[in-house]
Amino acid sequence: MTRDSETPKMQSDLGVSRLERELGVPAAQWTLDHIIDVVEKDNIRLISLMHMGGDGWLKALDFVPRSVGHLRDIFIGGERADGSSLFRNVPTGASDVVLRPKIETAFIDPFAPEPTLAVLCRHVGADGQPLPQSPDTIVQRAYERARVETGVDLWALGEIEYFIGRLWTHSDRYGKDDHGYHSTTPVAFSQPLRRRAMTLLGEIGIPIKYGHAEVGYVRAMAPGEVVWEQHEVELALTPLPRAAECVALTQWVLHNLALEMGMDCSFDPIIGEGHAGNGLHFHFSPMVDGVHTASGQTVAHMQEPAKWLIGGLATIGGALMALGNRDPRSFVRITQAKEAPSSVFWGARDRRALIRLPVTVTAPDGRVLSPPTIEFRLPDGSAHSHLLLAGVAQALSYGSSLQNIDELLANTAAKNVTGLHSHGSRVPTSMPEVGQALRTHRAVLEAGGVFLPAAIDEMITHLESDAL
């Protein structure tokens, strides 16, 4: 073994990934020598460079290492790819980009028939700098900008809701429409899939909070029709860029498992009108000097970072729908009032709110068992997690600059908002309205060079054309 004897060792196998157990070293401490050890020890035959595309889906470029030297070159230098086929606004005349592996994200692919080591990559341009069009670059820049300008290290977690569908048979035991919350077998037929997904996610290094059956259930009327069952996997808090990766990998795992088990997996905002849809709620915890700052339940008890984030989201939440509600069915989910926010207000424990302050779980002795969070309930399963979380970081930075933050929060507090469905307080209900909101607040997203003006131009044109 070539590991440095001084590298910190794992204190426990509980909650660590397969590679961390094998190496006995936390992922953050991995070196290229650790990767070579795993490839040789586990007889790895393939290396898969995975990366996030502009469309919100994970991509892959695969290699068969010819030698240890070749393997080193792959991890040190990466490999070129056609950026114009991956991202918009990359000219075809100068489209080469480089995929550069992030060693700490490596994992054994649980679905590959041949032993395969996968690793997530960043995108680098021909100038050797992070590619401005890359979702990985955008979320990283927004995160770092917020840290520098506000002193806040923003952590996040996603609540991934999804539907699993399969053909109805007479032998199945099912529940009834929109009554699946926390159901278990034999009623919850895809509970084994969810539990398997949670186990695999832990094995590849994705921290999980919990999973359960959700309320959404769409029954079939006769054998041969598809019954849809909704579940949720809630992740654990991680720094913002990693939170985006965790959402993408969770969706990847769920899709692959459904395929293996002969079922359908859908993250669509709505399966059928009148039924609960798939939200993709995000919880945020602003950290200052390594401490999760309490959100508080009232303006008087809030710390500044919580005020900044809530104020920023209340101001540009409609514009963020361009990144978090990208499907026409998003508006069906919002307007049918199935616990999806339709108006701009925040509130403690209020599931109708755009921004919700959930109850903080404490032990009987008063100890806080998990950090308080600020929940953004507008995004749905059509969201591009990297771009959306970058937009949230920009909202935080913007909120820190607002001079009237207390007045804004007072005016948007649930108890002070009247006429919740008036034009002035409701969220956009069509793609053109989202485009107009984006046009109004584009400067917030473009600040610090995070989102390119050309990319915002294209989004606005697409949204306002109502061509979707």
Image (tube, rainbow, N blue to C red):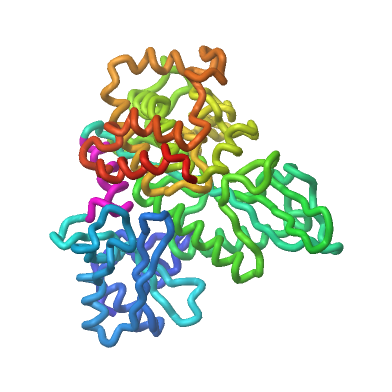
Please give the name of the residue rendered at 24% of the width and 62% of the height, measured from the top-left corner. Answer: 92
Q: Residue furthest left?
A: 127
Q: Which residues are magenta?
A: 131-148
* Residue 428 placement (x, y as % from top left): 49, 30
136 within the magenta span: yes
| Residue 29 visible in the snapshot | no
Quarter of image, res 270 = top right
Q: Is residue 46 above or below residue 327?
A: below
Quadrant in the picture for the N terminus: bottom left
Q: Left of 203 or right of it: where is 436?
A: left
Q: Is residue 296 above or below residue 104?
A: above
Please give the name of the residue rendered at 37% of the width and 73% of the height, measured from the top-left corner. Answer: 48
Q: Residue furthest bottom?
A: 66
- The foreground one among 4 and 166 is 166
438 within the magenta span: no
> Magenta stretch: dominant SS?
helix
- The foreground one among 343 and 88 is 88
Q: Is residue 422 above or below residue 274?
A: above
* Residue 220 placement (x, y as % from top left): 78, 54
